[in-house]
């Protein structure tokens, strides 16, 4: 064996997996079982008391899911990960470990529309208060910090316009405030950006998007960077204080630099219940094997489509950080040198009606509410994903009435451009 550290593409294929010890199966088997037999009574007791690692019940852990967890932790450079049923489930489980009722977290205003809803309405009913900040104005994060702030949440490449967030600058705000930085890395995937390398303490994903990559399975994941000290100031009692449900153990003291991932599993997933099906874990693992190939093609196609649109007379503007003229191009060069992702927006001179018209004329692009599929997708955010926002909030979050969002797939770029050309011209 050489002592070379495996590269990203090797990890995407191999990390966490080995031939099945019982059957020799080379692909990771789908362990489609709810529960696992204990060796004996002592073994059972030690598993329940967190004195030993092992399988108990698929709501808490499953061997197929464990391969997915190890693989994504390796790709993101974290210490451990926890797979859950969806991206939204990942967000709930993460914040449940950090916030008590009445606490606050600061979130970037430019976010996936579903996250804006979840933070504004569902989390409010838990007593978790979101305070919005502008990812293009780092000082707005500093101003939002209060003694009740428990976390900062941003997207690395932000929905819907594909803008690039200055992760390092916001990480220093989080460090100063003594709170963890959570980065939703869904639109970038670790192939383009590894937020932990830039100061993130926790990474979350909707696996539903580029990691799974084929538009066929929902999933989410939480990656623990192992960088945050949960014991300071008594701010994070779930991690620092004795847990009554586990014979009084303290998670940080017992599990060190993967205590947060453990808390998410043994307190969050166990009690809230959003477990990932092993079948979905298998589908997503298969997707991840080709992540580097797909992501490069997504980005190369996106850039070609963005260039075509920028030169089209019906188009007022294109927001794609990969274009040299884009205001996020500097940040894209720093954070995502391999490509600026495949989700971006453009606006039409004809406004709202032109947006609706374009969506109805496209043939190869599917009109639907998703991103990160092999297929190219289109949506008009103002009438769909962002329709719940008032007009000012729509514009602020990059989803004004004239804006169309694309998620560029891995088809031939000439076919994508031809489809846009006929739809724009007609
Ligand atoms: C889709 C998405 C989510 C939510 O993920 P689900 O798997 O749909 O629950 C969160 N963040 C971003 C950036 C997303 O694109």
Image (spheres, rainbow, N blue to C red):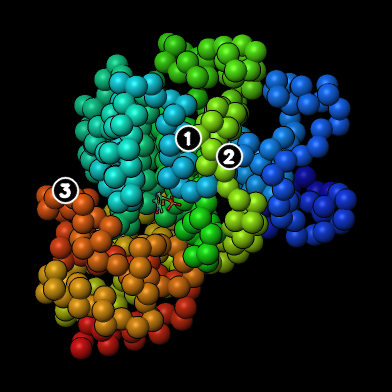
Pointer 3 and pointer 2: residues touching (CB < 8 Å)? no
Helix, strand, or loop for circle 2?
strand
Q: Nearer the viewer, residue 295 or 330?
A: 295
- Counting from the top left corner in percent of width and height, residue 26 is at 80, 59
Q: Is residue 153 above or below residue 146?
A: below
Q: Is residue 271 above or below residue 407?
A: above
Sooner in the amino-acid sequence: mark 3 or mark 1: 1
Residue 56 occupies which quadrant of the picture? Answer: top right
- The answer for how far apart the CA atoms under marks 3 and 1 are is 27 Å
- Counting from the top left corner in percent of width and height, residue 235 is at 42, 15
Q: Residues within 10 Å of mark 2 (few under 14, many from 20)?
A: many
| Residue on which the image places disc 3 | 393
Pointer 2 and pointer 1: residues touching (CB < 8 Å)? yes
Q: Nearer the viewer, residue 287 or 53?
A: 53
Query: Which circle, 3 or 1, is nearer the viewer?
Result: 1
Q: Which mark is residue 197?
A: none
| Residue on which the image places disc 2 | 82
Residue 332 occupies which quadrant of the picture? Answer: bottom left
Q: Nearer the viewer, residue 336 or 159?
A: 159
Q: In the picture, which quadrant includes the C terminus?
A: bottom left
Q: Which mark is residue 93?
A: 1
């Amino acid at each position: 064996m050489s002592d070379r550290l495996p590269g990203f593409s090797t990890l995407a294929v191999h990390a966490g997996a080995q031939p099945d010890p019982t059957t020799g199966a080379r692909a990771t088997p789908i362990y489609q079982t709810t529960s696992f037999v204990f060796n004996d009574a002592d073994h059972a007791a030690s598993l329940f008391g967190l004195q030993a690692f092992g399988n108990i019940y698929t709501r808490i852990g499953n061997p197929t899911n464990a391969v997915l967890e190890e693989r994504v932790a390796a790709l993101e450079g974290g210490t451990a990960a926890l797979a859950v049923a969806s991206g939204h489930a990942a967000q709930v489980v993460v914040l449940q470990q950090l916030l008590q009722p009445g606490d606050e977290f600061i979130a970037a205003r430019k976010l996936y529309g579903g996250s804006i809803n979840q933070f504004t309405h569902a989390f409010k009913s838990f007593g978790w208060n979101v305070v919005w900040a502008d990812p293009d104005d780092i000082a707005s994060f500093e101003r939002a910090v209060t003694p009740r702030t428990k976390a900062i949440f941003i997207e690395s490449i932000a929905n819907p316009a594909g803008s690039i967030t200055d992760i390092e600058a916001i990480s220093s705000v989080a460090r100063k405030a003594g709170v963890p930085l959570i980065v939703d890395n869904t639109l970038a995937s670790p192939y383009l950006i590894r937020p932990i390398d830039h100061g993130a303490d926790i990474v979350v994903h909707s696996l539903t998007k580029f990691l799974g990559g084929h538009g066929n399975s929902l999933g989410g994941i939480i990656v623990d960077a192992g960088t945050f000290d949960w014991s300071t100031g008594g701010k994070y009692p779930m991690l620092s204080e004795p847990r009554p449900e586990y014979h009084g153990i303290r998670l940080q003291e017992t599990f060190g630099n993967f205590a947060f991932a453990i808390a998410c599993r043994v307190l969050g997933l166990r009690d809230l219940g959003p477990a990932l099906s092993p079948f979905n874990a298998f589908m997503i693992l298969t997707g991840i094997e080709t992540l580097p190939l797909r992501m490069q093609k997504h980005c190369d196609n996106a850039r070609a489509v963005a260039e075509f649109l920028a030169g089209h007379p019906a188009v007022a503007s294109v927001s794609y950080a990969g274009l040299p003229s884009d205001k996020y191009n500097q940040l894209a060069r720093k954070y995502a040198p391999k490509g600026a992702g495949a989700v971006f927006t453009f606006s039409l001179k004809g406004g709202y009606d032109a947006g609706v018209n374009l969506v109805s004329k496209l043939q190869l692009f599917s009109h639907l509410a998703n991103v990160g599929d092999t297929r190219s997708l289109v949506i008009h955010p103002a009438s769909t994903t962002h329709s719940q926002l008032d007009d000012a909030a729509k514009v602020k979050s990059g989803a004004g009435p004239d804006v169309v969002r694309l998620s560029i797939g891995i088809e031939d770029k000439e076919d994508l451009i031809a489809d846009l050309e006929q739809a724009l011209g007609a």
